[in-house]
Image: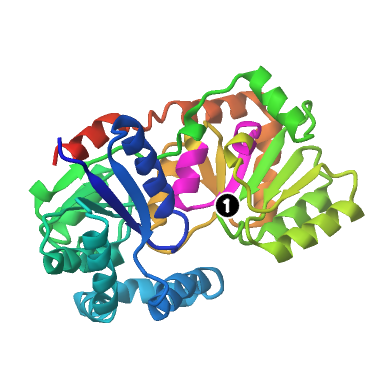
Amino acid sequence: MAKRNFMLLYLNTGGGHLAPAKVLKSHIERLYPDATVQLVNGFDKANFVSKLVFEKGYHSMCTVTPGLWRIVYELGQTNTVQKITQKFLNPQTSHYLKEKIINDDITDIISFHFALTPSAKTAIRKSGKKVNLSVVVTDPFTAPSTWFFTKGIKTYVASQQVKDFAIKKCKFGPDDIEFMPFLINEKFLQKVDQDDVDKLREKYGIPKDKRVVLIAGGGEGLPGTLNIITEFVAKKVDFSVIVVCGRGKKTRKTLEMLKKVHPKMNLFVFGFVTFLDELVKLSDCAIIKGGTSTVLEMLAANTPVILSTFIHGQELGNVRFVYENNAGWFIQKPKDISNKIFKLFSDDEYYSSVKKQTENLNLNTDCTEFVHRIMAQ
């Protein structure tokens, strides 16, 4: 078999594009050690305008002006806006990717971001090389039509819902769509027993005799965390609370000050962590946003979740999936979040029933067959 050189394309528009790319990379490398796999941000350093608009702009709108994001999202579904966007992105991005294809002798490109797919197609054509191009749709339940703007490309989706949307609404060729598993970091799939939980709590100095709530929201932390913690302080909760602030330095500093003012509250504050899986495993419940990777990782670890916020459009399906499978709740007000946790922790039968629902989800996370299909292209 000829050597395969993969380029997995992503953008820093939230962690939901890079995280599954990392999962696929690790599986390809383990199953086919002779293959090379590189993760590539589709915007090179010189393409600072695209980075500013897509990466910084996306983050700002989602966290600071969500109302504006709703407008941009809906406009982005139109063919006119998609064509204009590609005219803006294609020249610089396709040139960069063409050079990568030639210099690194790329044989396969997998796009994990819809904005990069047209440029990847152009880059392959201009390189004059035979390169397999496919797309992994990272929105498992409600995917924007932008994923299906470029026709005639092998595209992988995680649900029948998205496949039907692509075929019926976007007029995408049914033969070009295949199913894939949920690409979840294997660390979250490892089951733990009570002894494992106790050891993890001891490792991080967390009491073994109290329930634990985890608050996490991706790289920037969960919006509204301070309001939730303030509610917990006011109610003098008797459960431990872990907060992962990510890169949210201001929130972390405020929480550390709050911890000093209220030493009786079992509050544990972390910044950006590489051991989120361990914090999830030692927790009894998690308060999170509706991002795909975060939601699926929590559910894969059988942790009941409270979704306090989600990004308009693509994350709506994640919220519905949790709610419809009775694996958690969508609750926005800190007071209602607190009340739900009190009910969950005060009623063992209720908690066990919710926990059972997370165990019964039977998420398809087996990447082996998926990787074999990719290698057979």
- The x, y position of residue 219, in whole percent, is 56, 57
Give the residue type at disc 1.
Answer: Ile
User: Residue 49, how many percent across, how many down?
Assistant: 40, 81
Q: Which residues are magenta?
A: 279-298
Q: Nearer the viewer, residue 298 or 253?
A: 253
Quarter of the figure with residue 322: top left
Q: Residue at x 61, y 57 (%)?
A: 222
Q: Is residue 186 magenta?
A: no
Q: Quadrant of the N terminus?
A: top left
Q: Helix or strand or loop: what does disc 1 sit on?
A: loop
Which residue is nearer to you in this view: 339 or 279? 279
As drawn, is 149 to the left or to the right of 287? Answer: left
**Where is residue 307 shown, x and y percent of the image?**
54, 50
Reply above or below: 201 against 98. Answer: above
- Which of 135 and 4 lies nearest the eye of the viewer? 4
- Give the crowd class for mark 1: few <14, some 14-19, many >=20 residues within 10 Å: some
Identify the residue shown where x is 24% and y is 30%.
369
Residue at image coords 53%, 45%? 329
Residue 144 in sight in this render: yes
Residue at 16% across / 61% down in the picture? Answer: 170
Left or right: residue 165 versus residue 18 is: left
Q: Is residue 77 visible?
A: no
Indicate the quadrant where residue 221 lies.
bottom right
Residue 269 vertical position relative to residue 355 in the rendered view, above or below:
below
Furthest residue to the front? 103
Q: Quadrant of the C terminus?
A: top left
Does residue 106 sit above or below 33 in this rendering?
A: below
Q: Nearer the viewer, residue 230 or 195?
A: 195
Is 292 colored magenta in this rendering? Answer: yes
Hey, which quadrant is residue 11 in on the image? bottom left
The residue pinned by badge 1 equals 331
